[in-house]
Image (tube, grey):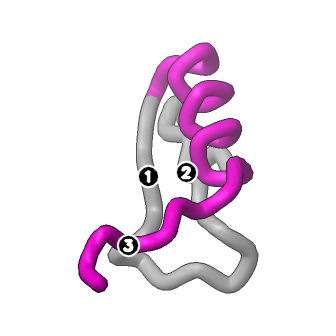
Amino acid sequence: MSKRGETIRLNHFGGLEDTAKYTTDLQDALALGRQIAGPRRASASR
């Protein structure tokens, strides 16, 4: 997580720009952070 001005950027450590999420709301940032940190689901294409 990083903050520049009012914009909060969340991403995996070393994540690329296309996986970053942005918000200006701290509660949204918390929810996005929990979502990013949660377990990854297996893809449905088998």
Packing grade of label 1 (10 A; few <14, some 14-19, many >=20) is some
- Look at mark 3 in the image and give the residue it sits on: 43
Nearer to us: label 2 or label 1:
1
- Look at mark 1 in the image and give the residue it sits on: 21
Tell me which amino acid carries mark 1: Lys
Q: Look at the numbered disc 1 and give the secondary structure of its residue.
A: strand
Asked if the residue under mark 1 is in contact with the one under mark 2, i.e. CB atoms within 8 Å, the reply is yes
Instruction: Residue at 69%, 37% (x, y): give it.
Output: 34
Q: Quadrant of residue 5?
A: top right
Instruction: Residue at 51%, 19% (x, y): give it.
Output: 25
Mark 2 to mark 3: distance in Å?
A: 26 Å
- Look at mark 2 in the image and give the residue it sits on: 9
The answer to which of 5 and 17 lies nearer the viewer is 17
Q: Residue furthest front?
A: 46
**Magenta stretch: includes residue 2:** no
Q: Look at the numbered disc 2 and give the secondary structure of its residue.
A: strand
The answer to which of 1 and 46 lies nearer the viewer is 46
